[in-house]
Amino acid sequence: MVREGSGGLTVASTRLTGIVRSTRAALALIEAPDGIGYILKPGDTLGDGRLLEIGSDSVVFLVTAKAGAPANRVVLRLATN
């Protein structure tokens, strides 16, 4: 699933709400500030970032702020309530 340029959406403004694992794949459940949910797999893009990896309780995105600028890694972690 690719959600490029989703209305100025940034990875930093989203939150990780869940991780689903099967024997074949892992999926990240991401929620945008407006409440819309996204189901992503590694390689998918969301707003300004591309999902690199899905861990046991976190995901890592590669985010490029501006064209030509170096990319940064942004880690989203599951909330621990």
Image (cartoon, helix red, strand yellow):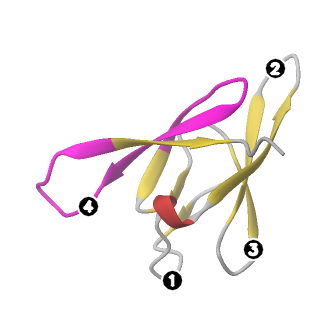
Which one is earlier in the sequence, the residue at label 3 or at label 4? 3
The disc at residue 65 is: 4
Which one is earlier in the sequence, the residue at label 1 or at label 2? 1
> Where 36 sits versus 50, above or below?
below
The disc at residue 36 is: 3
The residue singled out by tag 1 in the image is 7
Q: Residue at x 51, y 83 (%)?
A: 7
The disc at residue 24 is: 2
Q: What's the distance in space between the residues labelled 3 and 4, CA to CA?
A: 23 Å
Residue 56 picture location, percent across and down = 72, 23
Asked if the magenta segment contains residue 42, the reply would be no
Q: Residue at x 30, y 43 (%)?
A: 72
Residue 61 picture location, percent across and down = 47, 43
Helix, strand or loop at label 4? It is loop
Q: Is residue 36 left or right of residue 70?
A: right
Helix, strand or loop at label 3? It is loop
Of the pair 26 and 75, the residue shown nearer to us: 75
